[in-house]
Amino acid sequence: MKRFWRFVWVIWFYIVAGITGFITVVFTICCFPWRNAMQSLRRIWTACTFWITGIEVISVYDSEYLEYIHSGKPVIFCPNHTSHLDIPVMLEATDIDIAFIAKHELARNPLLLTYLKRLDILVKRNSVVHSALVWRKARALLEKGISLVIFPEGKIVYNEKTPCLGRLKDGAFKLSVETGSPIVPVVMMDNWHIMGDDGRYGGHPGKTRVLFLKPIYPEGDVRRLKSKYFKVMSYYLCNANIN
């Protein structure tokens, strides 16, 4: 019976997110096609979806992170990736202008493609030329003061028993070294438990904790930066169940 209700909740979540998301996309494209307005309205979408489905996002910020982010300088957020909740949770947990670097497959219809292109950067993974263009756009956004969100694992890494960190791709760390923008490790502690992977194991309402750790500055090469990030994230993920 418990598994049945977990599946019912996941279906309910996708219905709510789909309906409110469609209204948000159409409304913003037709009436408010400006970045600031679109960013605000999609945060309203996440807030409404989470309120209706019973999800509460609890954000914890390192003091050094707050000091840096209040200076107005952009950062590269690098969260672990365990759930389809990760993107809306990042929107709910931040209050600055951010752009996601996400796979092109997320935009499965022309309307959503138009919407996401105005806010984020979509990657066609099998195209070398397109990938080069993506990183050029990413550098341009950082120069404008817009922070980026990059999932360095490149895909959802899901484990039924505990969150874990998968193999890291170089992209975010190369961008950090090239631009001087620090990496901010973001630990998604509970998304995997509320709704892991694509929801095929069901889900439930609850509280999800997000830790914004102190920035890691690009001193040295890409390999060293990746190593620092991996060590910090692994420590917090191993202690993910600590209250």
Image (cartoon, helix red, strand yellow):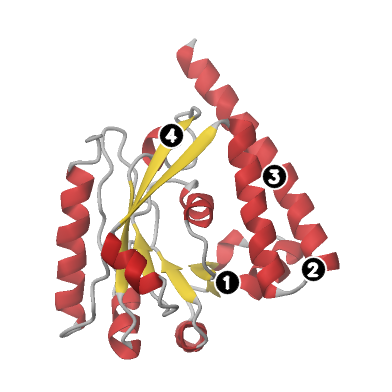
Q: Can you tell which of label 3 and label 4 is closer to the viewer? A: 4
Question: In the drawing, does residue 93 fall left or right of residue 78?
Answer: right
Task: Give residue 32's mark.
Answer: 2
The Cα atoms of the two marked residues, 1 and 2, are separated by: 16 Å
Query: Mark 2 or 3 closer to N-term?
Result: 3
The Cα atoms of the two marked residues, 2 and 4, are separated by: 32 Å
Q: Nearer the viewer, residue 114 or 218?
A: 218
Q: Residue furthest right?
A: 30
Secondary structure under the numbered disc 3 in the rendered image: helix
Marks 2 and 3 in Cβ contact (< 8 Å)? no
Q: Can you tell which of label 2 and label 3 is closer to the viewer? A: 2
What residue is shown with label 1? 120
What residue is shown with label 3? 18
Q: Relative to 183, is 166 above or below?
A: above
Q: Relative to 234, is 38 above or below?
A: below
Q: Amino acid at mark 4?
A: Lys
Would you identify the image quadrant in which residue 181 lies? Answer: bottom left
Q: Amino acid at mark 1?
A: Asp
Report the residue at 44% width, 30% height from top.
201
The Cα atoms of the two marked residues, 2 and 3, are separated by: 20 Å
What residue is shown with label 4? 207
